Image (cartoon, rainbow, N blue to C red):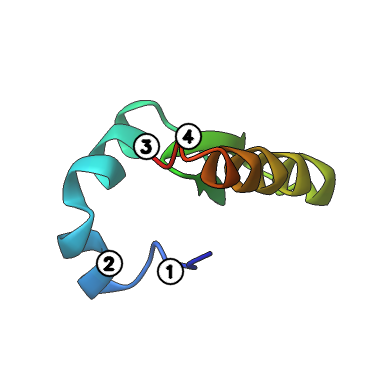
């Protein structure tokens, strides 16, 4: 898991393409992603985050790492 502060100038440069996509869609922050999959926009649900992390863990265990 990694946290990126969307207001950080460094993050905005390093993740410019993804940030532009969020802005073009007018998505409110926070935007939560697991393995590149958007799982939450505008509010972070602990339950949806846990489900996504469990799916990612199962994929990793099955050798299907993205």
Q: Nearer the viewer, mark 2 or mark 4?
A: 4
Q: Position of residue 4 (x, y in %)?
A: 42, 66
Mark 4 or mark 3: whose residue is earlier in sequence: 3
Say which label, 2 or 4, has the lower sequence index.
2
Label 3 to label 2: alpha-carbon separation: 13 Å
Please tell me whether mark 2 sits on a helix, a strand or a loop.
helix
Q: Do the residues labelled 1 and 3 touch (CB within 8 Å)?
A: no
**Which residue in the structure is indicated by mark 1?**
5
The local crowd at label 3, few if under 14, some if 14 to 19, many if 20 or more residues have their Cα within 10 Å, is some
The numbered dot on residue 37 is 4
Q: Distance between the residues labelled 1 and 2?
A: 7 Å
Residue drawn where x is 75% and y is 40% of the image: 51
> Which quadrant holds residue 15?
bottom left
Residue 47 is situated, as x and y percent measured from the top left of the image, at: 84, 44
Q: Is residue 63 left or right of residue 52?
A: left
Which badge, 4 or 1, is on the more N-terminal residue? 1
Of helix, strand and loop, which one carries label 1? Answer: loop
Q: Where the C terminus falls, by quadrant?
A: top left
Residue at image position (27%, 42%) is 18
- The residue that mark 3 highlights is 22
Q: Nearer the viewer, mark 4 or mark 3?
A: 4
Q: Mark 2 points at which residue?
A: 11
Determine whether the residue tagged by mark 4 lies in a helix, strand or loop: strand
Residue 46 badge: none
The residues bearing labels 4 and 3 have C-alpha atoms spaced at a distance of: 13 Å
Are there few (<14), some (14-19), or many (20+) residues within 10 Å of tag 2?
few
């Amino acid at each position: 898991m990694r946290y990126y502060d969307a207001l950080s100038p460094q993050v905005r440069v390093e993740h410019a393409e993804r940030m532009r996509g969020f802005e073009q869609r007018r998505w409110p922050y926070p935007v939560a992603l697991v393995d590149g999959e958007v799982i939450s926009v505008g509010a972070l649900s602990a339950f949806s985050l846990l489900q996504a992390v469990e799916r990612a863990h199962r994929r990793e265990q099955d050798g299907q790492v993205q």
